[in-house]
Image: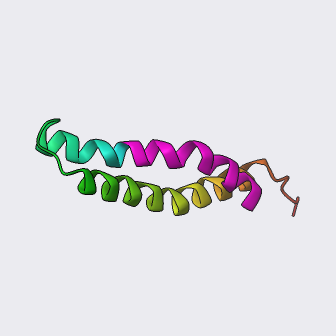
Amino acid sequence: MWKLAAILFIIIGPTLAGIGALVPLTVYGVNEFNPLLLAIAAGIGLLVAIPVSLVVGKKINDAIRPRRLA
């Protein structure tokens, strides 16, 4: 599961960081935003991507694992 989550993080991490970076641009506009606020929002998006990729990796791992017959 950890390997799958690491592979998923390669896709999910930049996606959520980009979404986080769009928040200050949307709220303050392109000419009026603070670059530090942009970096902080992108970092928060990247940190949120860690548990998201772990949850998605676990869900995929559970879906492809063969089930035992009772």
Q: Is residue 23 left or right of residue 13?
A: left
In the foreground, 32 or 25: 32
Instruction: State whether the magenta stretch is mostly helix, strand or loop.
Output: helix
Q: Is residue 60 left or right of residue 28?
A: right
Residue at image coords 76%, 56%: 3
* Residue 50 in the image, given as x and y percentages of width and height: 54, 61
From the viewer's side, name the closer residue of 60 and 42.
42
- Residue closer to the observer: 59 or 51: 51
Compared across the picture, whether 64 is left or right of 19 comes to right
Which residue is the extreme one toward the top? 30
Give percent across and percent down for residue 34. 19, 51
Q: Looking at the rendering, in which quadrant would you find the C terminus?
A: bottom right
What residue is drawn where x is 83% and y is 56%?
67
- Decide: is 49 above or below 21: below
Magenta stretch holds residue 2 = yes
Q: Is residue 1 visible?
A: no
Residue 1: quarter of image: bottom right
Q: How does the figure colour the protein chain or chains?
A: rainbow
The percent coordinates of residue 24 (x first, y second) are 21, 47
Question: What residue span does the magenta drawing correspond to?
Answer: 1-18
Residue beneath the point at 46% across and 62% down: 47
Q: Is residue 25 magenta?
A: no
